[in-house]
Image (cartoon, helix red, strand yellow):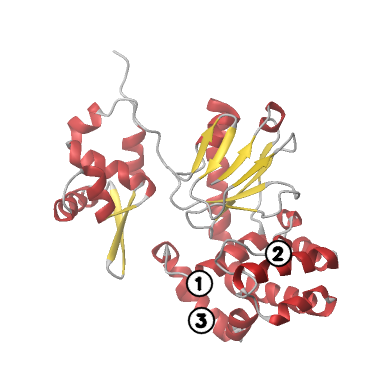
């Protein structure tokens, strides 16, 4: 579990990145290439990116040069996602080049302790190898990220709009409470659970920068070094898109308790098995109900291999957001 401890001053210094952080998106997208988790959500990206990397001659570079530096593990070097990345790709890459050699050596040593990285990574203290790294990151961004920037911008704009609405109605604490199913606001502590390590970060008045990410999947990520400015990268996918009903009775009466439970489970994405567990029925029965919800336009279903994942449509989200009128 990761815990951020807030003071009253920290609550006034919570910020949300206004633009995509290019280097964090590179890091998270490289993580997507290393797992099948969440692949349904990125299916179009996978299809086009594999071809783009091959046509750009980057397949070997990604496999032997980038993936060893961005392992999908409990650690990768903080220097690869500098705060300057919020100002754009060029600013972020310049910060990577300008990283002091002592810090590079320290973080590469940490990488080797965690995953046993290749011996060549120790040469990242040399400017010429970091220049090669910057060139590879730029080429990867051009092939794998840039073609999808319009979609990413649209999703981040929607997220900023959501935050603005929350801030207006519920303040900063409401914003912190609505970041996702693995992020829990228990004043004055923001808890991320599960998390690869147990760590407490005391913000001590510096605040927290929230970075919504298109390619981050389910598990939020923070910088490993607590001495650096505190940031939290969190996923746009599987965001709670609804406001829970204070009284579930009207929805149960409309849909029946089983379908209502399955609809609520779809708010953060659920497989048929997960929906069955949530509703207390067998997977066969849940499959019947998801078919009805899908046919009435309340959920949509995506198949990936042997798994079907159900998510809300805008109509389904609107139905869950509806509150009973006062009588």
Q: Secondary structure at mark 3?
A: helix
Q: CA distance from mark 2 to mark 3?
A: 25 Å
Give the x, y percent position of residue 97. 81, 68
Q: Secondary structure at mark 1?
A: loop
Quadrant in the rendering for residue 23: bottom right
Mark 2, residue position: 80
Name the N-terminal-most of marks 2 and 3: 3
Quadrant in the rendering for residue 214: bottom right
Estimate how packed mark 1 is, as few (under 14), some (14 to 19) or many (20 or more) residues with alpha carbons within 10 Å. few
Give the x, y percent position of residue 98. 84, 65
Give the x, y percent position of residue 1. 53, 47
Residue that lies at the very extreme toward the front in this rendered image: 113
> Which label lies toward us, 2 or 3?
2
Please tell me which residue is depicted at 66% across the width and 42% down the height of the picture.
201
Q: CA distance from mark 2 to mark 1?
A: 18 Å
Viewer-side residue, 172 vs 182:
182
Viewer-side residue, 174 vs 104:
104
Name the N-terminal-most of marks 3 and 1: 1
| Above or below for 106 versus 281 | below
> Looking at the image, do the residues carrying marks 2 and 3 touch, with CB atoms under 8 Å apart?
no
> In what quadrant of the picture does the C terminus appear?
top left
> Looking at the image, do the residues carrying marks 2 and 1 touch, with CB atoms under 8 Å apart?
no
Q: Which numbered tag is attached to residue 51? A: 3
Viewer-side residue, 212 vs 128:
128
Give the x, y percent position of residue 92. 75, 61
Mark 1, residue position: 34
Q: CA distance from mark 3 to mark 1?
A: 17 Å
In this picture, residue 247 sits left or right of residue 220:
left
Q: Which numbered tag is attached to residue 285? A: none
In this picture, residue 303 sits left or right of residue 233:
left
């Amino acid at each position: 579990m990761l815990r951020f401890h807030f003071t009253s001053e920290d609550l006034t210094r919570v910020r949300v990145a206004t633009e995509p952080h290019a280097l964090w998106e590179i890091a998270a997208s490289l993580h997507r290439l290393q797992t099948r988790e969440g692949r349904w959500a990125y299916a179009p990206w996978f299809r086009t990116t594999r071809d783009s990397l091959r046509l750009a001659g980057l397949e070997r570079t990604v496999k032997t040069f980038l993936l060893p530096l961005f392992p999908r593990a409990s650690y990768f070097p903080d220097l690869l996602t500098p705060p300057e990345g919020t100002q754009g790709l060029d600013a972020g890459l310049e910060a990577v080049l300008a990283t002091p050699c002592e810090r590079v050596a320290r973080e590469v040593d940490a990488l080797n302790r965690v995953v046993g990285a290749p011996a060549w990574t120790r040469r990242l203290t040399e400017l010429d190898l970091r220049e090669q790294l910057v060139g590879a990151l730029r080429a990867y961004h051009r092939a794998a990220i840039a073609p999808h920037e319009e979609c990413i911008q649209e999703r981040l704009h929607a997220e900023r709009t959501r935050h603005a609405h929350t801030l207006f109605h519920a303040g900063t604490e409401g914003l912190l409470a609505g970041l996702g199913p693995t992020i829990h606001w228990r004043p004055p502590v923001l808890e991320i659970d599960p998390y690869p390590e147990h760590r407490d970060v005391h913000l001590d008045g510096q605040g927290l920068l929230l970075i919504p990410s298109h390619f981050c999947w389910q598990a939020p990520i923070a910088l490993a070094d607590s001495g650096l400015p505190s940031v939290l990268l969190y996923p746009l996918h599987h965001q709670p898109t609804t406001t829970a009903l204070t009284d579930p009775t009207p929805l149960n009466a409309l849909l029946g308790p089983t379908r209502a439970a399955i609809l609520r489970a779809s708010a953060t994405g659920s497989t048929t098995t997960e929906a069955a567990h949530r509703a207390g029925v067998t997977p066969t029965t849940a499959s019947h109900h998801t078919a009805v919800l899908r046919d009435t336009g309340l959920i949509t279903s995506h198949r990936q291999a042997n798994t079907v994942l159900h998510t809300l449509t805008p109509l389904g989200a609107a139905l869950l957001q509806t509150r009973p009128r006062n009588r």
